[in-house]
Image (cartoon, rainbow, N blue to C red):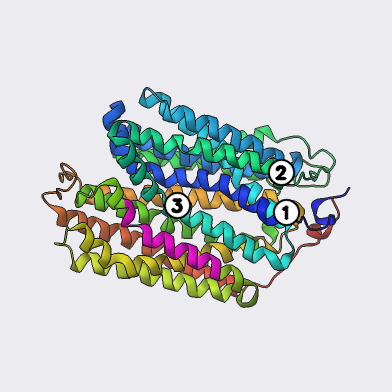
Amino acid sequence: MTTEADLPLDPHRWRGLVVILLGQFCALLDVSITNVALPSIGRSLGAGASELQWVVTGYVLAFALIPVIGGRLGDTRGRRRMFFIGLSGFVIASAAVGLSPSPLVMIIARVIQGFFGGLLGPQVSGYIQNTFAKSERGRAFGLLGGVIGVGTALGPVVGGLLIGLGGPEFGWRLVFFINVPIGVVALLLATRWVRRDTPVVDRGSSSLDAPGAILLGIGLLLVLFPLVEFDQFHNGWLFLLMFPGAAVLAAFIRRERSLSVPGGSPLLDVRLFRVPTFTTGVAFAVVFFCSNTGIPLLLSLYYQQGLGFSALESGVGISAFAVGFVLGSQVSGRLITRLGRPLVLVAVSVFFAATLAIGVVVHFAGTVTNPTDVILRLVIPLLALGVGGGSIVTPNQTLTLMDVDPRMGGAAGGVLQTGQRVGSSVGQTVLGTLFFLSVANVAVSSHIGQPATDHVAFTNALDIGLAGSLVFSGTALVLGLVNVRRKRIRPPFMEAPG
C-alpha cells in the first residue's frame, strides 16, 4: 500500500502545518486561559471552589485521555479526517462553554471540549513525521514547540485582555467564544492546504480497541482523581484509589501486549517501548511538564490572590515566559539535528537555574506589591525560564519520535501527547496543592489593586511551590543524563513493511 512516506513532498506542507498548528493552538490555549477567568466565572455562575477546579481539571483530564485513541484513529482512519472531526467538535463545544448557564453545564461542555481538543495533538505530530523530510522535522517540531509555549503561557495574557474587553460578566464568555472564528478559519484553510492522506491499515487494524480504551480511561481517572480533588476534600484516603488505578492500567498493558502481534489491533502497540530513546523521552516529557506547566499557574495565583493583580496584569506578568519559549523553540529546532541530546541537557539546566532565580527574586522582594515593579523584577528570570523550556520541548519531541517508524507517527505522538498532558495535570495539581496548603486560612486579596493583608504568606507559598517544581525539573535533568547515554536503536519490527 502507498503511504505518505512514499509520496513526493507536499509543496503546501508548511502552509498545511501552520493551519494544523492554528487548531492545536486553540486547544492548548484553553489549558491556561481559563485560570485567569475562574474568578469571573465563579461570580457570574455562582460556582464553588470544587466546581471551578473541575472547570480546569475536567478539560485537562479529557485532553490527556484522548491522544492515544486519537493517534490510533489518525493512523488507521486518516489524520486529515481526524483533524477535521477534532477541530469541528472543539469549536462547537467552545461555543457551548461560552453559553453555559450553570456550573454543571459548563463542566460537561469543558470535558467534551477536552475530548475533541485531545484529538488534535497526535494529528500534528503524525503530520510532521509523514509529511516532512527528516532534515526538516526539527524545524517543523520547532514551530510546534513554539505553539505549545505560546498557547500555554500566553493564555493568561489573552484571557486578561478578553475579560477586560467584555467586562466581568461577559468577558469570561469571550475567552471561549474566541475559539469559534479561529477554528472556522482553520477548517476552511485546511480544505485547501492540508493534503488528503492514505491511512496505514494493516490486517485487522481498522478496528478500535474499545475495551482497551475503557481500561485506559478508568485507570487514568483513578490515578489522577486523588491528585485533582485532594485540595477540596483534604482526605488522604483518596490516594488509595491509585492502587486499583495502577491495577487497571496494568491490565490495559497486558491486553495491549497480547494484541501487539502481526494482524492484531492494539490501541497502543507496546512494541514502541522497545525503542530506548522513545521510552526515556516519554518519561522525560511527563516529568518535565509537571514543572513546566505548573509554574505559570503558581505565578497567576500569586499575582491575583496575593498581590491583587488584575487578570490583565497577571497575564502580562507571565508574558516574558511566552516570549522566551518561542525564542527557545525556534533556535533549538534548527540546532537539534546537529547537537542532539546534549542540547536538551543544557536546556534543562537553564530551566532549573531560572526556576531557582525566580524563587530568589520573589523571596527577597516579598514586600514589593506594585505590579510594574514586580513584573520588571521577574522579566529576566522568566525570559530565561521560557528559553530553557522552549529548548526542551522541541528537541525532546523531535528526538523521542526520531527512531519510530513514521507510519506509527500518530500512535507514538499520541503516547507522547498523553505523557505531556498527564504531566501538566499532575504538575498543576501538585504545585497548586502545595500553594493552597501553604496559605490555608489566609485571606486572599479582597479586590483588584489591593494586596492580601498577609501577602508575605503568598510569597512563601510561591517559594514552596517553586521548590516542588525544582524536584520535577531536577528529576528531568537526571533522565536527560540517562538519555544522552542511550544509543539509537530501531527494533526490527519498525523496519517491517506495513
Task: Tell me the magenta residue range.
Answer: 315-331
Marks 2 and 1: CB-CB under 8 Å? yes
Dot placed on the residue nearer the N-terminal end, 2 or 3? 3
Question: Residue 475: where, in percent of width, then height?
Answer: 45, 65
> What whole-number distance in Å separates the C-alpha atoms at marks 2 and 1?
9 Å
Marks 2 and 3: CB-CB under 8 Å? no
In the image, taking residue 13 as reference, residue 322 lies left or right, namely left
Residue underneath mark 1: 12
Question: Residue 237: where, in percent of width, then height?
Answer: 35, 39
Q: Secondary structure at mark 1?
A: loop
Dot placed on the residue nearer the N-terminal end, 1 or 3? 1
Q: Secondary structure at mark 3?
A: helix
Residue underneath mark 2: 192
Q: Amino acid at mark 3?
A: Thr
Dot placed on the residue nearer the N-terminal end, 2 or 1? 1
Q: Main secondary structure of the magenta part?
A: helix
Does the magenta portion include 326?
A: yes
Question: Residue 453: where, in percent of width, then height?
Answer: 10, 49
Q: Residue at x 21, y 66 (%)?
A: 363
In the image, taking residue 98 as reference, residue 236 lies left or right, namely left
Residue underneath mark 3: 152
